[in-house]
Image (spheres, rainbow, N blue to C red):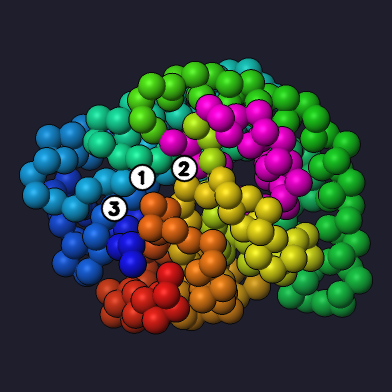
Amino acid sequence: MAGFALSTAWHAPRVADARELLALPARLGFAAVELSSIGSDLAQALQGLVRDGLPPVVSLHAPCPVPYPGAERLDDLAALEEPRRLAAVGYTKESIDLAAALGARVVVLHLGGVEGTVPQRTVVQAMAAGPEGEWKRLLADGLALRSAARDRHLEQCLRSLEAIAAHAAGSGIRLGAETRYHYNDLPDVDEFQMILNAYGARGVGYWHDTGHANTHETLGLTRPLEYLQRYGAHLVGVHLHDAVGTRDHLPPGEGEVNFAALRPFLRPQHLRVFEVWSGHSTERLAASLRVLQEAGV
């Protein structure tokens, strides 16, 4: 069975030493590391440690390094404003360069979103308050706005991918377009086909996110396992975390995700990255590792 990597999204907020950033996951039983949510100082220091007996860095979550506070999940690759889009392309290129320098295999990408829709949090709040018809009406309104504005954002997304794929060519780095969380994000379950048709031969693959997929199922946007059934042949890796409805990034075993159902889609070469937010204890992480191992993931 392939080993698990730990995303530094869990411990980067409280670890300031580059060596400890890599050593801590090993002490917890993880075989590798995904870099996420780290600044430029840590990124520079890590380059001197990659062959120093520490767990390997197998993937980076762009943008990495984080260019400014709050940019950990920068989603501007589909922005209509060219300065925003071009800046996001530049940050992604830096992520690719760092990944190559560290000997990583994959850079995980958020491809942006469609602006001007009903915020997903509004839909989720209506869902929690009931009745069912209200949140479904809000979501339908948002999807109609998304559909009307999608093409311009998708065009920008493809322009960004063109530049990013060209930059990654020859580097040995795969690009993993991630299952997104918000309904207005790009790509949705159908739009992935367009992305993979255009760039699958140029190093862009599918990165599955278990919690995000659960959110789309909760909102009625997809069937269970639909993303993997349709795009599993393009899979490069998976973010493993649990979810309850639309609340995700919980330790596996503490929500409703069926991790055993992932088994038919996973191969030894696929990266398995444990991605929970900071605040969850080491004891909960250890229990979650056991959950995944017992599930055969």
Q: Are marks 2 and 1 in contact (CB under 8 Å)?
A: yes
Q: Residues within 10 Å of mark 3 (few under 14, many from 20)?
A: many
Residue 241 in view: yes
For the residue labelled by badge 2, is the local secondary structure a helix, a strand or a loop?
A: strand
Residue positioned 54% across, 67% down in the render: 264
Question: Residue 59 at x, y = what percent?
Answer: 36, 45
As drawn, the residue found furthest toward the left would be: 52
Give the spatial CA distance, label 2 vs label 1: 7 Å
199 inside magenta stretch: yes
Q: Which residue carries the number 2 mark?
A: 108
Residue in front for this viewpoint, 159 or 127: 159
Q: Are marks 1 and 3 in contact (CB under 8 Å)?
A: no
Residue positioned 33% across, 50% down in the render: 34
Q: Would residue 194 appear left or right of 99 to someone viewing this image?
A: right
Q: Which quadrant is home to the C terminus? A: bottom left
The residue under label 1 is which amino acid type?
A: Ser
Q: Which numbered circle lies on residue 59?
A: 1
Mark closer to the chain start, 2 or 1 = 1
Residue in front for this viewpoint, 130 or 60: 60
Question: Residue 242 at x, y = what percent?
Answer: 51, 71
Residue 3 location, quadrant: bottom left
Give the spatial CA distance, label 1 vs label 3: 7 Å
Give the spatial CA distance, label 2 vs label 3: 13 Å
The residue under label 2 is which amino acid type?
A: Val
Q: Which residue carries the number 3 mark?
A: 33
Per the rendered image, the range of residues in magenta is 174-202
The residue under label 3 is which amino acid type?
A: Val
Question: Residue 115 at x, y = what percent?
Answer: 74, 38
Mark closer to the chain start, 2 or 3 = 3
